Amino acid sequence: MKLTENTQRIALLASVVVLAVLPLPDFWITQLNYIALYSLVILGLVLLTGIGGLTSFGQAAFVGVGAYTSAYLTVNMGFSPWVTVFAGLAITAVSALVLGWLTLRMSGHYLPLATIAWGLSLYYLMGNLDALGKYDGILGVPTLKLMDWDIGQGRPFFVFAWSMVLLGAFALLNLLDSRTGRAIRALRTGSQMAEAMGVDTLRYKIGIFLIAALFASLSGWLLAHFQRAVNPSPFGLKMGIEYLFMAVLGGAGYVWGALSGALVTKLLEDQLQVLLPKLIGTSGSYEIIVFGIVLVLVLKYLPEGMWSLVGRWLPKPQRINNWQNAAALPERTKPAIGDTVLEVQAIRKQFGGLVAVNDIGFSIQAGQIVGLIGPNGAGKSTTFNLITGVLGLTSGTVKFRGEVVSGRPSREIARRGVSRTFQHVKMIPEMTVLENVALGAQLRGHKGALSSMLRLDRAEEQSLLREAARQLERIGMGSQMHELAGNLAMGPQRLLEIARALCSDPALLLLDEPAAGLRPMEKLALAGVLRRLRCGGMGILLVEHDMDLVMDVTDHIVVMEFGTKLMEGTPEEVQQSPKVRAAYLGTEH
Amino acid sequence: MDLSIVSILLLDGMTNGAVYALLGLATVLVFAVTRVIFIPQGEFVAYGALTLAIFQTGKVPGTVWLLLLMAVLAAVLDTRLTWQHTRNAPKALKAGAMTLLVPAVVAVLSIWAAPQQFPLLVQALLTVAVVTAFGPLVYRLAYQSLADASSLVLLIVSVGVHFAMTGLGLLFFGAEGFRNPSFWDARFSFGALNLSGQAVIIFGVSLALIVLLWQFFEHTLYGKALRATAVNRLGARLMGISSHGAGQATFAMAALIGALSGLLIGPTTTVFYDSGFLIGLKGFVAAVIGGLASYPTAAVGALFVGIVEAFGSFWASAFKEVIVFTLILPILLWRSMAGGHTEEH
């Protein structure tokens, strides 16, 4: 697999050189050069929109930043293009960071809105600044030279630009198949699960916006030196929208899909620009009518883009188990059996006038399974969310291994060794079971985006996958690890969540209705897993409606009703309590 | 700069701001009920101003033919949908006819009235009818079957609709701009301040429309139904409120507001086929000031945008748009500091 993948990539790079040597008409080489420039921008949109679920209409503006910076510095200051490319990237990075930091902490639609405004103001700025030549732009931009060899035009440029596109695509594919890539894929499912796995979602969102902007800036740099001139028109909002169109048409979720979108769009645009004015009788950019309608139709009838038609015929690459010899991940020091791991002291949550959790207190020791039960609406899940930091407390404290953790964000609590599952399963359906579970080990790896892109993360990656595979085998799902998570039935999905939680090497495991939807045999297996974990010294909090399971495995039970603690005690005490019976079944009069 | 210039700029800014306020309200309204970020709001403005301009020349505006085409498409879709659900041919045909009815009447009326050179006010009424009829059809054709998609998808659809509508605007109205005659030529002088009759109309209509909308949402059952849909679509549906109907009604209102805005600004500036986009986006900036949620804040924000724009064009006219659209950055900073809410989608 590893070998064939590398062979494929080298073959692709070689085919670029071959194409350049073939006697293609110069017209086609020029067209393909423009497509390469678009493709670089599109690569960024794949990451941002297709994978990350965010979007930007301002990519053309970032192209403009790269182009204008380089044009201005080379023409007016005499710098070499090989220096100015970094200046362009730096200015782009600063603007992307500011925009991202301002908008991404708010809900998802503020980023596209801000990028529209940013694209417009940058366009008018470029068109009105004397220093940038107003709407005429900057002329006489030098071509790109390697020593004395002109690689900024024609066939040499074709090889140069397409090599950059392919290397960019490989880097992106590498990134998506890594620890960082899994965190990025998790962004789309909402922040709650990703944060619970220790992912700082804001940082990752800003990160992918930054990477997308840098790809665009690089394309602008190439464009400026390829065209030998810059003016504002290719950097306006119309082009920003067209970039998105290309990505969506081809399939924003697939690297090769989005690139084929760029190809098809350019060819379509050329045809339409000739055909439509003939049809209508006057000239004008009528192709946007077709683009607009096609965009709506694609989203309606082919939401995954054209690539979804091609992709299903391609063989699915199967991951090869090559992590047998990987180093085991270091484990945290665990509390001794009997030590108190969790102390919940009088926690309270009010939503306006409603007291959802009313001064609840209990504690969990290492090697103890505590059940949290109560009728629907008793406040169990809210309690759960208060402990894990998903919700802020109104008052009270939560201590984990003696340290106060209440008030911290959930990823910080996760970092200390608290792991959880969700009442409504939260996973990434288009990733395999193994990759989903490896997401749980997020905090046990350290390699970032750059190492992933350059494949410097492989040793750590194999250790992470080895751990994920180990946890899957531990809960009896070893045979399903290469299945897509979205194909699993309800029961295995819940087990997947438990394996993912275990992957983080927790000292405290919080399970929110793990048995819901499980078949009787699966429930028995789950009980076995829980008992083994207890023997290993794990503290477990179990929210569950299945009383057989609760009474069977727990050591201690806390009963809640209407937000308050009704009682706590051993399973026997709880079963005999008239108060509990009244809460579940009502009282006799 | 002396006081008289300040007052002139303030008045100018508030006149434009009043129109932005209307557009901002429409944006907030559409977003609240349908979760659609309706980028093409401004296209209705251009369609309004330019449809009236073509009526003025005694020709049938291209928008009328577009209206008919879209109505036929929507009718076919509705017929098919009802047929699939009920397998009842008369019912299906009736559903299609219902969709076709209003746009067809409006279109036929327009085609008949266009060469008759009716007075300005009648042509204005026809224009409003034509553009308003677009609203439900745009929702039906572009958004309805995607109503449950993520707001990201809806946003990209909006961009597609914007492209299509701008291109069609170019096709129907050409690249040249039009300036409509004023509805009221009176002029009032207060010292240095000159108040045109058109400005009075702008203020009057904007205020009246805002009060009307407020009354509609506070005091009518249908207004409350729309508000219920805004709060919880599924819940509203279970109470018997059709979310498709709510979407179409909301888009009709957005189109109506757009058409009126087009009529209001038509005499104050030359409108081109693509002018609506920038005008609509300024309404958008206002809506963002209101967090896409608060009507009063959006309205106040719109006046602010108008005034900034007026002063911007006085001091640095070339950078007017740069100033207005860069304004969104401090606004976003303020909003993220004030609210800072992250939405779980």
Image: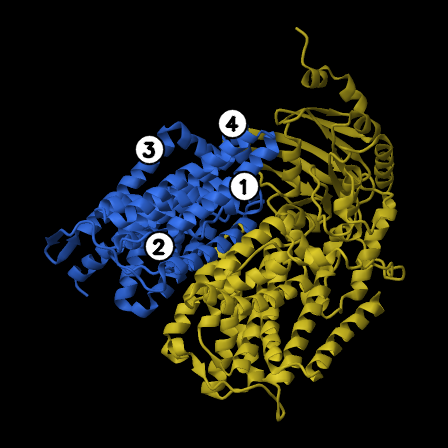
Chain colours: A yellow, B blue
Task: Kindly report which numbered mark, 1 or 3, lies closer to the viewer in this rendering.
Answer: 1
For mark 4, what is the residue?
A: B240
- First reached walking from the N terminus: tag 1 or tag 4: 1
Location of residue A23 with respect to B288 vertically, above or below? below
Distance from the alpha carbon under mark 3 to that under mark 2: 27 Å
Q: Earlier in the sequence, mark 4 or mark 3?
A: 3
- The residue beneath circle 3 is B215
Say which element carries label 1: helix
Quadrant showing the C terminus of chain A: top right
Of badges 1 and 4, nearer the viewer stands: 1
Quadrant containing the N terminus of chain A in the rendered view:
bottom right
Query: Which residue is the extreme one toward the bottom?
Result: A148
Q: Is residue A462 above or below residue A402?
A: below
Q: At 39% across and 75% down in the image, what residue appears?
A: A135
Can I make out residue A135 in this image?
yes
State the CA–CA distance, disc 1 to disc 2: 28 Å
Name the residue: 52% across, 55% down. A293
| Residue at figure coordinates x 56%, y 67% from the top left | A213
Q: Quadrant of residue A555?
A: top right
Contact check, label 1 and label 2, Cβ < 8 Å: no
Q: Earlier in the sequence, mark 4 or mark 2?
A: 2
- Chain letter for the residue marked with disc 1 in the picture: B
> For the residue carrying disc 4, how many other residues have a C-alpha within 10 Å: few (<14), some (14-19), or many (20+)?
few
Which residue is labeled 1 in the image?
A: B77
Indicate the position of residue A23 as horizontal and vertical percent values.
68, 84
In this view, the residue in front, B297 or A540, is B297
Q: Which of the marked residues, 1 or 2, is nearer the chain's N terminus?
A: 2
Q: Mark 2 — residue?
A: B46
